[in-house]
Image: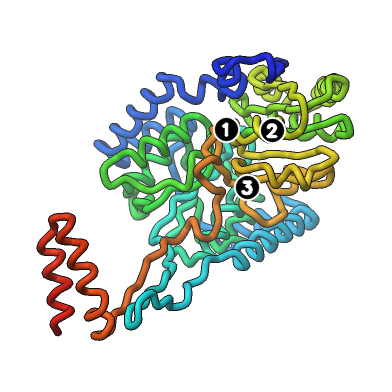
Amino acid sequence: MRTLDWSSLDEAGRRDALARPARRTEASVTDAVRRIFEDVQARGEAALNDWCVKLDGAPPRRLAITPEAVAEARAAVSPEDEAALKTAADNVRRFHEETKPADSDWIETTPGVRSRRVWRPIEAAGLYVPAGTAPLFSTLLMLAIPAAVAGVPVRAAVTPPGPTGQPHPMMILAADLAGLDALWIVGGAQAIAALTFGVTIGDWGLPKADKLFGPGNAYVAEAKKQAAALPGGPGLDMPAGPSELMVIADRQTNPTIAAADLLSQAEHDADAQVILVCDDDKRIEYILEEVDKQLADLPRAAIARASLNEGRVIRVKDTAEAAEVANLYGPEHLSIQTADAEALTDRITAAGAVFVGTYAAETLGDYAAGPSHVLPTDGAARAFSGVSTGAFMTAMSVQQVSRDGARVLGPVAARLARLEGLEAHARAADLRSAL
């Protein structure tokens, strides 16, 4: 991890200190995704099959979540594993049920003119669940359950075959807990392309999604971006690429815990990024020593080391400056492990999720606390929120006007329309006023 002193950096140096890994925006990634999209759009099933065989090592397939498939998966895991998964699913469902947007009451802005805001689920959601180097069945819960709570009729969940070619048993159990009837075993940019255009495969197929959800590697993130840029293309939940974590520490931070949190994100992906922000040189030294010590016996040490090469240590003068750095970076995950953690949280304006204090491990949020762990990356937290029930819904304004209301407000609207040079607008208002 590169160590930088914030106060000694000029504007360009500060931009470089907070830059994401270059691979996320490499031209080769953009070009590869474009080729996949053009091919799937032109050749449909044949192209999807070819790309899946080439990149996943297997053709795409639909795995039905039948009682038999669930029973087989259940037999492959321990009762304790299944109980943990159910606890996580219950917490995710409860949180999203409690935070589901509600239709507003009628608001009368002028006598006889009233409006309200109502929410409706989208028709088809494409849910991307990573499983290339690790089977993220937790992501399936974090996407499919909020979509179900929102009332989305079509939830198409796609996931790569993974190293074994078969979904992890916990992925099947997670799909069952989320109420899905199938999983589509297809990953990467080709899965996003299939959800963008809709692809028929034999007697089944992937639907054209109205909106795409889920995190992924650089190729998946780029695919979502290209999908949304197409005319009539799907909407996006947010930019959700490789994982990132910023830890704000001070002289009272537990070095063992801070190091464990940094490594918990570094082991995700070589493109993941971790940043330590601290105002105490000795604490920085202790934390980095702990990182090296814990890294030694980590099963995914090679991946973590690759990620740490893109990591940063930023020395700041105090925790107030640390908050400024956090807001400039806009981290996906922000862990505040300082003596004034709660007060410092009030200074944060841009983060996907904030974990406050020593006990609030980011890992708890990843798996079981309740809020979705699908969060904006690459600084998008300055403008986007994490996945919620509302992300699977759209809001409409509904307006009702009485005769008296039209007579009062019609002349106002007509006058403003004529000032803008829109005579037909004005006449439509005048007609109501005259009824």
Marks 1 & 2, CB-CB < 8 Å contact: no
| 421 to 221, vertically: above or below | below
Q: Residues within 10 Å of mark 1 (few under 14, many from 20)?
A: many
Q: Residues within 10 Å of mark 3 (few under 14, many from 20)?
A: many
**Mark 3 element type:** loop
Q: Can residue 160 be seen from the camera position used here?
A: no
Q: Nearer the viewer, residue 159 or 276?
A: 276
The residues bearing labels 3 and 1 have C-alpha atoms spaced at a distance of: 13 Å
* Mark linked to residue 242: 1
The answer to which quarter of the image holds residue 6 is top right
Residue 417: percent from left, percent from top: 18, 61
Q: Amino acid at mark 3?
A: His
Q: Position of residue 164 (x, y in %)?
A: 60, 36
Locate residue 152 relative to residue 258 in the image: left or right. Answer: left
Quadrant where the image shows the C terminus: bottom left
Which sits in the foreground, 168 or 259?
259
| Residue under pointer 3 | 373
The residue to which callout 2 is attached is 246
Residue 211 vertical position relative to residue 49 in the rendered view, above or below: below
Q: Amino acid at mark 2?
A: Met
SS label for mark 2: strand
Marks 3 and 1 in Cβ contact (< 8 Å): no
Compared to residue 77, the image places residue 134 above or below, namely: above
Real-space Cα separation, disc 3 to disc 2, in angstroms:
15 Å
Q: Is residue 9 left or right of residue 37?
A: right
Give the label, 1 or 2, closer to the camera. Answer: 2
